[in-house]
Image (cartoon, rainbow, N blue to C red):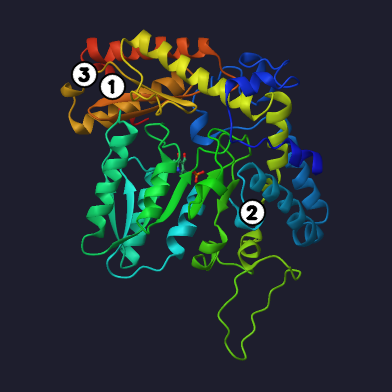
Amino acid sequence: MAELKDLAVPPSDTSKNEALDSPSRGESVQFGHKMRKFFLFDRQYNNLNHGSFGTYPSQVRSRMRHYQDLCEARPDRFIRYDYPKMLDCSRKLLADYFNAALDDIVLVPNATVGINTVLRNLRYNPGDKILYCSTLYGACEKTVEYVCETTPATSIRVELQYPLDDDDLLEAFRDGLKRGQDGGRVKIALFDAVSSLPGVRMPFAELTDICKQNGVLSLIDGAHAPGQVPIDLAKLQPDFFIGNCHKWLFAPRGCALLYVPRKSQPLMRSSLPTSHGFVPLPCEGKIIHNPLPPSAKSEFVNQFEYTGALDNSPFLCVPDCFQFIEEECGGQREYMEYCQTLARQGGAIVAKLLGTEVMDNKEGTLSKCFFSNVRLPLHAEIFTSAERSQVSQWITNKLVFDHHTFLAVFFHADSWWVRLSAQVYLESDDFRWVGQILDQLCRKINDGGFRDALKISDVEE
Ligand SMILES: Cc1ncc(COP(=O)(O)O)c(C=O)c1O
């Protein structure tokens, strides 16, 4: 494992010069369609939406199957004795990658479980509030709602309308905090590193600082961060951070990290679900049997190691994902640089074809990620709000069933937008291709009488 650990490049610097200065890296890497050979796509399918569910290279799949085979060869030995050690290798690589202490990093199946773990473990008193931005991922907003239904907590929603300068976003966030402190206190604020819709980078370091200055717990939804955004947790010091490895780190689905620094660990009484690792408060005469081998690891780490019988083989693929990025993508810096550049170029190509614009602010911070969001040339005013979701569905249905691709289509700030993902297996031609398709679809909606074009009954198929 020592070599694999060394392959995890510290993510603190993605500068072009650094990347070009490192002689042995990236020289033979050919990004774009040549990379498709590493992936498992249907020949007809063009994946322009890596951001939703990710996908992983065939070599990572083979490793996952290998771990599954090891498990089936000796189920008890593997689950009770071998798997915990292998899991520690993945934790160690992620701890090094994010510059965090090993004992502050555990693995969970996905960001949803991570966010639920944090929000459901906190104890809320009357007057406690959970603050979040309106662009929060829908399932996370629903988790906030659920917590508010089942505890004394209430929520504060900060409305964001993009494109937005970072300073304006920070001011809106501060205003939200002020509102929340009125007649109570904001206990925790939840915000993204890179939000989902729109797919934009948020000023998460500044937001974390504001939380610290105001005595508010910070929970960063970094679902899109691993692989995409350099993060130094020792510097950032949020109270909680969650990151999916199954998006931009190429892990199989079901692999995410939860970072809880030592000072916040007492707030996390249990993994979700609670399992053998849970240590109940002492109760005289009551001993609950734990069938797992004794462990010297901390209560926090121990709890998340086993949360019931599951196939945790995706957790074990973290070293293989780092290896793929190192060997086939030329390293983290090259990977990040290619995808960020392609996202910008691709977005510009699509916007030009559509005669619209890419969503960005004047500092260009929104697009410092692997997404670009392009406005669709549709006349929003001719649609009722009920028809709007049908418009989005019609476009996505056409993309999926006629053109074998997918883009997230969403309505934001009185316009339709598409979110495009850049990835190593794509090149600018793919954006040109999908831009032309979008142009045709939008023309059909705008020119041909939109109700005909929508063929609303087809949308139900
Ligand atoms: C910002 C954000 N948070 C959370 C999630 C949920 O991730 P998962 O489905 O892996 O739990 C997503 C999924 O796309 C997301 O984009």
User: What amino acid is found at the position of numbered circle 2 in the picture?
Assistant: Ala
Work out whether residue 367 or residue 213 is closer to the camera in this orientation and state it: 213
Is the residue under label 1 in contact with that under label 3 (CB below 8 Å)?
no
Q: What residue lies at 61% left-to-right and 15% top-to-bottom? A: 32
**Looking at the image, how many numbered discs can be counted on the residues?**
3
Whole-number angstrom distance, CA of label 3 to CA of label 1: 18 Å
Work out whether residue 168 or residue 49 is closer to the camera in this orientation and state it: 168
Q: Where is residue 428 in the image (x, y as percent from the top left)?
A: 51, 12
Q: Can residue 273 be seen in this view?
A: no
User: What amino acid is found at the position of numbered circle 1 in the picture?
Assistant: Lys
Residue 297 location, quadrant: bottom right
Task: Name the residue that disc number 2 marks.
Answer: 101
- Disc 2 within 8 angstroms of ligand 1 (CB): no
Task: Name the residue that disc number 1 marks.
Answer: 455
Earlier sequence position, callout 2 versus callout 1: 2
Q: Position of residue 294 (x, y in %)?
A: 75, 71
Q: Can residue 153 be seen in this view?
A: yes
Badge 3 element: loop
> Would you place residue 402 above or below residue 269 in this image?
above
User: Mark number for residue 82?
Assistant: none
| Tag in front: 3 or 2 | 2
- Disc 3 within 8 angstroms of ligand 1 (CB): no
Q: What residue lies at 69% left-to-right and 45% top-to-bottom? A: 93
Whole-number angstrom distance, CA of label 2 to CA of label 1: 55 Å
Task: Name the residue that disc number 3 marks.
Answer: 379
User: What amino acid is found at the position of numbered circle 3 in the picture?
Assistant: His
The quadrant the C terminus occupies is top left
Work out whether residue 325 or residue 436 is closer to the camera in this orientation and state it: 325
